[in-house]
Amino acid sequence: MEPLQMLTLIADETLTAALEKEIVELGAKGYTLSKVMGRSPRHLRDNPWDGENVKIEILVNPDATEAILQHVKQKYFGRYAMIAYHYPVHVSEVYQS
């Protein structure tokens, strides 16, 4: 099995539809999306009246990781509240239907 990265994006929920489309176009075969709340040094988002954040977890190869990171850095960083991080993962089993 090829090496994989867990790429996680946490972003304003208004970006959800665009990010879902773009990450697939950039090499993701799938992703997991969750609504999340939290706090950063610059902002507290702990109630739905302020809008919500989404957490998108993407299991991808290193090339797709770089492509997605470069894309979100150029298009969204500096304009929207967003964080991205990644780390290597070892998948022990994959179910394919």
Image (spheres, helix red, strand yellow):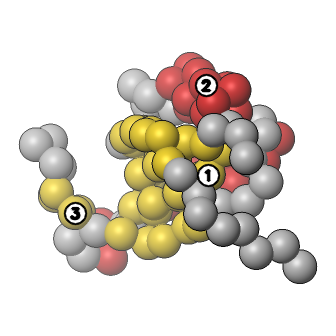
Mark 3: secondary structure: strand
Amino acid type indicated by mark 3: Gly
Q: Is residue 12 left or right of residue 39?
A: right
In the rendering, which numbered label is found on residue 47? none
**Residue wearing tag 2:** 66
Left or right of 23 on screen, residue 29: right
Q: Residue at x 66, y 68 (%)?
A: 93
**Residue 96 occupies quadrant:** bottom right
Q: Which residue is mark 3?
A: 38
Rounded to the nearest angstrom, the CA distance separating label 2 from label 1 is 12 Å
Q: Position of residue 12 (x, y in %)?
A: 44, 54
Q: Position of residue 65 (x, y in %)?
A: 61, 33
Question: Can you identify the residue that label 1 sits on?
Answer: 59
Q: Which badge, 3 or 2, is on the more N-terminal residue? A: 3
Residue toward you, 52 or 4? 4
Badge 2 marks a residue whose secondary structure is: helix
Q: Please say whether residue 8 is visible from this viewpoint.
A: yes
Q: Position of residue 80 (x, y in %)?
A: 42, 38
Identify the residue at image location x=43%, y=40%.
87
Residue drawn at x 53%, y 57% is 57
Foreground: 95 or 56? 95
Q: Is residue 71 above or below residue 23?
A: above
Amino acid tagged 1: Leu
Residue plotted at (44% across, 28% down): 77
Give the image quarter of residue 63: top right
* Crowd around label 2: few <14 · some 14–19 · many ≥20 (10 Å): some
Nearer to us of marks 1 and 3 is: 1
Height in image: 74 above or below 21? above
Residue 16 visible, this orientation: no
In this rendered view, identify the residue nearer to me: 87 or 74. Answer: 87
> Where is residue 41 drawn, in percent x and y?
10, 43
